[in-house]
Amino acid sequence: MLRVAGLTRRFGEQLALDDVTFDVVPGRMTGFVGANGAGKTTTMRIILGVLAASSGEVFWQDKPLTQAVRQDFGYMPEERGLYPKMKIRDQLIFFGRLHGLAAGAAAERVDKLIGRLGLAERATDVLENLSLGNQQRVQIAAALVHQPIALVLDEPFSGLDPLAVDAMVDLLREEVTPEVPVLFSSHQLDLVERLCDDLVVLSRGKVVAAGPVSELAASQTPTYRLVVDGDAGWLRDLPGLRVRDVAGGTALFDVEDDAVAQQILQQAIGRGPVLEFGPERVALSDVFREATR
Amino acid sequence: MNDRTLDRPWMLIAEREITTKLRDKTFIGSTLVMLVVVLAAVIVPALLSGNSEPDKIAVTSDAGAAVVAQADAAAGGSGYEAVRVADRAEAEKRLETDAAAALVPAADGYVLIGKEKVDSGVESGLRAAVAAVGMEQNAAKVGLTPEQLRAGTQVTQELLEPGSLPAGVSDFVNLGMALVFYMTALGFGMMIAQSVVQEKESRVVEILAASVPIRSLLWGKVIGNATLALGQILVIAIGSVIGLTVTDQLDILSVIGPVVGWFVVFFILGFVALAGLWAVAGSLATRQEDLGSTTLPGQMILMIPFFFSVFAGSTAKTVASFVPIASSMSMPGRMLTEDVPLWQPLAAIAILIATTVLIIRLGARLYERTLLQTGRRLGYREAMALEAR
């Protein structure tokens, strides 16, 4: 397990990270979300040792993370980049060896990976001659080439079309074995919701929510949706609920408990035809908005 | 999966640095051009001056042939060759084809006939031979042997402070050695800076920094490029030795030979000290275009001592041969052309080592702090003030 404990980082006067603590559990994808400048990239850079923490520490299997262990991590930085004028096969072998693979083993692994990515015919092309989508594949291959023991991916899906996202998700599912903890940051909340088991929400350098996605969603006060034939404005005068929005016959409201919701339904039936009634599924974006408010 | 470690990451970095350059057509091309230039510098003057064909001198008599033989012997045996012709008219005709001059008897000695002019070397050689042959004959008439005739006329030369090379040659060799260091340190220095900024520009540096310690990156680059630089010098040295062998000038090697070892030591130390600085110049920049300003200090540190060591007087040169970096350019040359006591190069090396350690330490510190600053170009002063990562 990868544990981030009490990370604090200052850039001059500015406090970029403030006591950031969370776990990345093996076999579960952990999504890392937060607004721009919330400190996601800074946290990831500290995990990878590219940046030092002002205080706090990163633990691997309950021991402080060392350079030797970190060398087996896989990392895809937010700012993409490989050697533009190097052949992709040579390049990936170089990265494999940089992570400690022997030359022969690296070559074998790279050939397998290149085949799986459908780049076998381009193996001797230099990177800059590849399409952007293919360059992105090589980039993810560079993070996976040494079969990492943990994966840190900073915005891995940004700039990809939906098909490419699916392809990359499939690749991750194939390549990442159950004992590997995966942390990835993203702005695309729908993607995070689809892929992630756990969620860490960061706001202005602080962790404001962390835990399994299902729990985070359930902890919100339930929101109901009511559609009646006529005007729903009468809801505003009722006790025990908070109206989010009323537009004509459609209303969104939060209730303290489900019993209140049932009373409201009965009232509505008494007033006229009810077209729709039920709890609204809580979107992750609401969790996010709520947490970072 | 966990038992893999990379013991010497700098070796891998150096290896990539070297293989990339060896596949780079520009690098191979420029090395070949340098090789051709050096070969031309070695071979062409020898071909022009050491024209081994003897000058043909047309003669009309045995006496004339004897004079040419005497001139040939005085010139060391490959200077002149007599061509026997019937008379003056035929001799003049030979001047049109292959003869350098014609020597025909006249009332009181000989006439030397040329076409448009007579080469001054040919003229003085034949003049001396005519005089020698004539005087020997005159002496024989009064009963003197050639030895008696020449008794007491020998002049030999002794030098109180002999330089190992003639003055013109020693200036040339001094300049040459300084130039080799200057060109190589500047050329490969710029390559180091470019290689660093390319990694920053392409952002691959963050993956590198996440995989290996940043100092390993620095050392890999420095060692890789130093190896390339020495390799290039070696290729050119072998090329010029072949050139010297072909043109029969190998005796120059026996003069340069003893300082080659010193040159290599001074070269490596001076190169490594500067390499640290070049790497920093690369890490301060964010784009190739920034290199012009960030490499300026490195260029100055090379250029000022270079012109100093080439144009300064001998006292100043002696001082320069102890100043770090400048010593790499002037000490090997001084050792070649002057009689330098052993303590001097040793002291210069000690000073150079101390400076190299200092520069590399400072360089590594700056490099670590600036390498991941991809936002904008930094100044040296700004970089000094940066906090650790």
Image (cartoon, grey):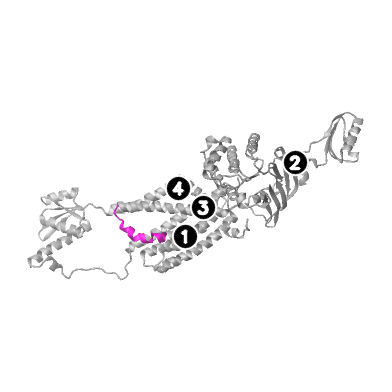
- Number of callouts: 4
Q: Which residues are magenta?
A: B247-263
For marks 1 and 3, the one nearer the N-term is: 3
Picture quarter containing residue B344?
Answer: bottom left
User: Does A179 sit above or below residue B366?
Assistant: above
Asked whether the residues under marks 1 and 3 belong to the same chain, the reply is: yes
Closer to the camera, A186 or B219? Answer: B219
The subunit carrying tag 1 is B
The kind of residue tagged 4 is Phe
The dot on residue B221 is 3
Asked whether the residues under marks 2 and 3 belong to the same chain, the reply is: no
> Is disc 3 surrounded by few (<14), some (14 to 19) or many (20+) residues within 10 Å?
many
User: Does B350 sit above or below residue A76?
Assistant: below
Q: Disc 1, disc 3: CB below 8 Å?
A: no
Closer to the camera, B283 or A256? Answer: A256
Q: Disc 1, disc 4: CB below 8 Å?
A: no
Residue B201 locus on image (x, y percent) = 57, 48
The dot on residue B347 is none
User: What residue is pinned by disc 1?
Assistant: B269
> Is disc 4 surrounded by few (<14), some (14 to 19) or many (20+) residues within 10 Å?
some
Residue A79 locus on image (x, y percent) = 62, 46
User: What residue is pinned by disc 4?
Assistant: B27
